Amino acid sequence: MGAEEKATFAAGCFWGVENAFRKVKGVARTRVGYTGGHTANPTYEQVCGHGTGHAEAVEVVYDPAITSFEDLLETFWSIHDPTQRDRQGPDVGTQYRSAIFFHDEGQREAAVASMERLEKEGRFRLPIATEIARAAEFYEAEDYHQQYHEKHGTSSCDL
């Protein structure tokens, strides 16, 4: 692997999001956690209590020589409904919001361009509600959440 880069996405329950990104060629590793809020070192229970402002998110470390940030954006757009505000399927709350947390100006520009292109193409019936924000502190989730699908062989996001 060459020089690695980092990308951070929120698209609902982080178990399925992590599972999808782990399948992308060029992704070296992932971890699930919480970001975008105001509480330091939050627990899963605190995030679910809606008082932290954090989203369930996935940090993706990838090799840009194998996969691009734009490729990761395509995965992001395809694995959830970005028109939903603060929910995905049965999961409701700000922690399930759709968000791209950019790590540099190039990622921000790519995310905005990608979203604008999808809006112009009419790929989604409703307006995209995805938040594009600067990456903040990422708090790794509890160990039992990491690679949940691989450990439990389930597609459920319920505990």
Image (cartoon, helix red, strand yellow):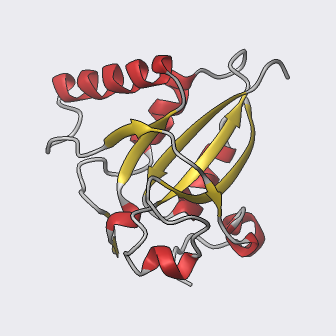
Which of the 4 image quadrants contains residue 78? top left
Q: Residue at x 42, y 25 (%)?
A: 108
Q: Is residue 147 left or right of residue 159?
A: right
The residue most toward the right is 1
Q: Residue 7: x percent and y percent?
A: 58, 35
* Quadrant holding the C terminus: bottom right
Q: Residue 99: x percent and y percent?
A: 39, 46
Q: Residue 133: x percent and y percent?
A: 39, 38
Q: Total label count?
A: 0
Q: Is residue 5 left or right of residue 134?
A: right
Q: Is residue 127 left or right of residue 72?
A: left
Above or below 11: residue 25:
above
Q: Residue at x 23, y 46 (%)?
A: 129
* Quadrant holding the N terminus: top right
Above or below 39: residue 21:
above
Q: Residue at x 69, y 53 (%)?
A: 31
Nearest the viewer among 101 and 20 is 101
Which of the 4 image quadrants contains residue 151? bottom right
Above or below 46: residue 109:
above
Nearest the viewer among 69 and 126 is 69
Nearest the viewer among 87 and 8 is 8
Q: Residue 85: x percent and y percent?
A: 24, 57
Q: Residue at x 43, y 69 (%)?
A: 52
